[in-house]
């Protein structure tokens, strides 16, 4: 069971336009885990409507690969892992679900989790203070991941496997979908199938 808690409020954890590939609807795979009850997966999509160019057989083929991951709000880094090798696309390493990851504490019972990052690409260490928008690492393909992407969720404790998930609300973002005009949002949650970016 999930505890009833106030949601997290922060900025999108990236720059530019990203595709919401997964979120927390009833049938979403994130619902398997209490900590990921309100999680998101973000991809970069190229001009051909795919997340990669070429064959997609190398991590470097993917548009998201190596891009900066940003702190969603001010806080302090309380967990960082940076030593897990990357996967070959399509071959996830489920034994270490989050792969290389960062956890930031934003206050009492308020944490954010950034996963599947690139080994050697971390820009912060445990104990470092961060401001909203600071680069904390780079998008990779480590852990239970089939392609380079950013997994993000908010939770009420520092352990990404145990801290109950809480809703994440984003400030000042723009949404759009295929064939629709862009909409500016001051605050809200985002949905799978949208393209989202900061103004």
Image (tube, helix red, strand yellow):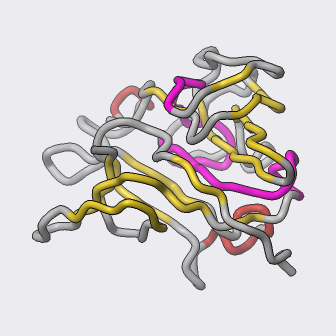
Rendered residue at 78%/70% (across/down): 5
The residue lying toward the viewer, choosing from 120 and 15, is 15
Task: State the predominant SS element of the stretch in magenta.
Answer: loop
Q: Count the marks: how many?
A: 0
Residue 182: percent from the left, percent from the top? 18, 62
Rendered residue at 82%/64% (across/down): 164
Residue 190: percent from the left, percent from the top? 43, 66
The residue lying toward the viewer, choosing from 25 and 166, is 166
Residue 81: percent from the left, percent from the top? 77, 27
Q: Which residue range is magenta in the image?
A: 133-162
Looking at this view, name the residue that lies furthest to the bottom.
26
Rendered residue at 44%/62% (across/down): 187
Q: Indicate left or right for 182 with 35 as reference.
A: left
Rendered residue at 56%/41% (across/down): 72
Q: Indicate left or right for 193 with 49 as reference.
A: right
Determine which quarter of the picture holds residue 115.
top right
Determine which quarter of the picture holds residue 126.
top right
Q: Is residue 137 magenta?
A: yes
Q: Indicate left or right for 190 with 53 as reference.
A: right
Q: Is residue 136 magenta?
A: yes
Residue 104: percent from the left, percent from the top? 73, 37
**In the picture, which quadrant includes the C terminus?**
top left
**In the picture, which quadrant includes the N terminus?**
bottom right
On screen, residue 165 above or below 83: below
The residue lying toward the viewer, choosing from 189 and 65, is 189
């Amino acid at each position: 069971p999930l505890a009833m808690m106030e949601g997290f409020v922060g900025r999108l954890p990236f720059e530019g336009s990203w595709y919401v590939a997964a979120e927390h609807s009833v049938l979403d795979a994130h619902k398997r885990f209490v900590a990921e009850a309100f999680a998101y997966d973000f991809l970069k999509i190229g001009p051909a409507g795919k997340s990669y160019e070429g064959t997609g057989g190398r991590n470097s083929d993917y548009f998201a690969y190596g891009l900066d991951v940003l702190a969603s709000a001010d806080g302090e880094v309380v967990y960082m892992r940076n030593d897990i090798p990357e996967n070959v696309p399509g071959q996830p390493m489920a034994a270490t679900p989050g792969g290389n990851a960062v956890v930031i504490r934003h206050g009492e019972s308020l944490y954010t989790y950034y996963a599947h990052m690139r080994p050697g690409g971390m820009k912060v260490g445990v104990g470092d203070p961060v401001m909203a928008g600071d680069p904390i690492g780079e998008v990779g393909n480590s852990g239970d991941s089939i392609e380079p992407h950013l997994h993000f969720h908010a939770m009420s404790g520092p352990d990404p496997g145990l801290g109950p998930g809480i809703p994440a609300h984003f400030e000042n973002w723009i949404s759009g979908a295929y064939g629709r005009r862009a909409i500016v949002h001051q605050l809200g949650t985002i949905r799978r199938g949208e393209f989202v970016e900061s103004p």
